[in-house]
Image (tube, rainbow, N blue to C red):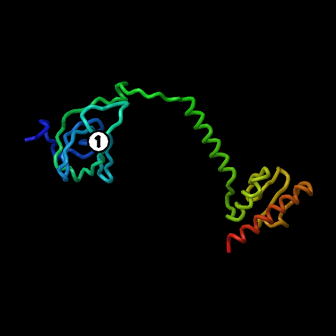
Amino acid sequence: MDPAGGATVANDIGEGEKFTVGNIYSVKVITGDEFRGIVMAYDPIPNFVFFEEGSKPRAGHSKNTRMVNANFITGLSYLGKSEDPLVTGKFHVDIDLEGLRAKEALAIRQAEADAERLGVGVTVEAQSIFDALSKTLPVQWENTDILVMKEVRVRSPYLSDCVFGGTDAANNRVKKVIELERRRLQLCGT
């Protein structure tokens, strides 16, 4: 006899159909534990079912959830289907759409800025020199050259004698940063 008074689910129903979100079951697991739960999610690859305990959704309240390996379910009785609170409108969430859009725009700008800071086809050493220069000077990649202050160019292999253009003061400043960064890299590399 089924303790929950529900119909036992037939074995020929596929797991995905059996564990449709919103289905309510009386569940017994291999450990002997029994509970009533609403299917919240089903992942077929590891064969896990996520249940919200109880037989009514509790929007806005804390929930007890259980993650159960479907292979360890020894008894499963269908009790009905719950109303999906997201579909019926009984679930209320305040969402600041403008705030979310602002965060998204900021994240996109940050990702674009980060992408501009990464050299394509350059060595780790070249990227390190670029990063060191960027701490105090405006820099950008132009193919594999580092362009500093839009006037000083540093070419591969990114040595002091590979610095071209710009005023003498700007040129000397870039050379000094390159020498210091190369010295730092040599200390870290040994």
Q: Position of residue 99 (x, y in %)?
A: 57, 31
The total of numbered circles placed on residues is: 1
Residue corresponding to mark 1: 51
Residue 142 percent location from the top left of the image? 75, 54
Where residue 170 sits, quadrant-wise, is bottom right
Quadrant housing residue 18: top left
- Is residue 9 toward the left or the right of residue 171 in the image? left
- Toward the top, the furthest residue is 89
Q: Residue furthest front?
A: 62
Question: Is 130 placed left or right of 70 in the picture?
Answer: right
Rendered location of residue 177, percent (x, y): 80, 61
Label 1 neighbour load within 10 Å: few <14, some 14-19, many 20+: many
Would you say 5 lies left or right of 41 here? left
Residue type pointed to by label 1: Phe
* Vertical position of residue 54 compared to residue 143: above or below: above
User: Along the line of sight, which residue is nearer the eye, 122 or 149?
Assistant: 149
> Residue at left 69%, top 52%?
117
Instruction: List x then y, in percent, for residue 168.
Output: 92, 57
Query: Measuring 25% from the left and 36% from the top, which residue is drawn there?
Result: 54
- Residue 61 quadrant: top left
Secondary structure at numbered mark 1: strand
The answer to which of 182 and 88 lies nearer the viewer is: 182
Residue sitting at the far bottom: 190
Quarter placement of the C terminus: bottom right
Q: Quadrant of the N terminus?
A: top left
Task: Name above or below for residue 16 compared with residue 181.
Answer: above
Above or below, comparing residue 73 to residue 60 in the picture: below
Residue at x 23%, y 46% (from the top left corner): 14
Pick out the residue farthest to the left: 1
